[in-house]
């Protein structure tokens, strides 16, 4: 026999982790907006994890080369020494007068 016999009350898995509502007719949890899973035990991230980041218990775990709460920021060596902008993982766009992979070097231009 499939379904719910008339009048029977079904329990939901793990009491919907106390963050959802149990439908006692179906035994299925209706999770609040911050949680997911059959028992509402999986906490969602507040925003999508970018650049191949993965949501783990409500926090984005970033792939190599990225950081930030949503893995939105590229990581560069020595943060480009404050002399440039990180435009991709490990790639600094240096300000005028600076160079090198991390903008550490002072660059002099000769005028002919």
Image (cartoon, rainbow, N blue to C red):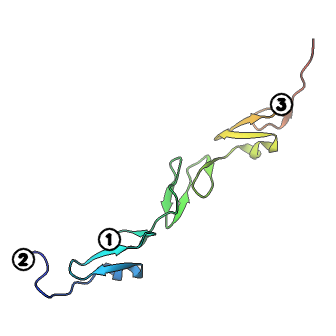
Earlier residue among tags 2 and 3? 2
As measured in the structure, the alpha-carbon distance from the residue carrying label 2 to the one carrying label 3 is: 76 Å
Pointer 2 residue: 1
Q: Check disc 3 and report its element: helix, strand or loop.
A: loop
Pointer 3 residue: 96
Residue at point 78%, 34% (across, down): 94
Residue 110, image quadrant: top right
Mark 2 nearby-residue class (10 Å; few <14, some 14–19, many ≥20): few
- Residue 109: x, y in percent? 89, 22
Name the image quarter holding the C terminus: top right
- Residue 107: x, y in percent? 87, 28
- Contact between labelled residues 1 and 2, with CB atoms less than 8 Å apart: no
Reply above or below: 108 against 20. Answer: above
Q: Is residue 82 left or right of residue 18?
A: right
Pointer 1 residue: 38
Reply above or below: 80 against 10. Answer: above
Residue at point 93%, 15% (across, down): 111
Q: Check disc 2 and report its element: helix, strand or loop.
A: loop
As measured in the structure, the alpha-carbon distance from the residue carrying label 2 to the one carrying label 1 is: 22 Å
Earlier residue among tags 3 and 1? 1
Mark 3 nearby-residue class (10 Å; few <14, some 14–19, many ≥20): few
Q: Nearer the viewer, residue 109 or 32?
A: 32
């Amino acid at each position: 026999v499939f379904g719910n016999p008339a009048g029977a009350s079904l329990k939901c898995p793990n009491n919907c982790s106390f963050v959802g509502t149990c439908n006692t007719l179906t035994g299925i949890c209706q999770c609040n907006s911050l949680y997911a899973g059959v028992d509402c035990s999986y906490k969602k991230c507040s925003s999508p994890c970018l650049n191949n980041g993965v949501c783990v218990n409500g926090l984005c775990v970033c792939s190599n080369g990225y950081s930030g709460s949503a893995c939105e920021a590229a990581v560069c060596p020595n943060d480009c020494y404050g002399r440039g902008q990180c435009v991709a993982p490990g790639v600094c766009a240096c300000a005028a007068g600076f160079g090198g992979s991390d903008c550490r070097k002072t660059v002099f231009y000769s005028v002919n």
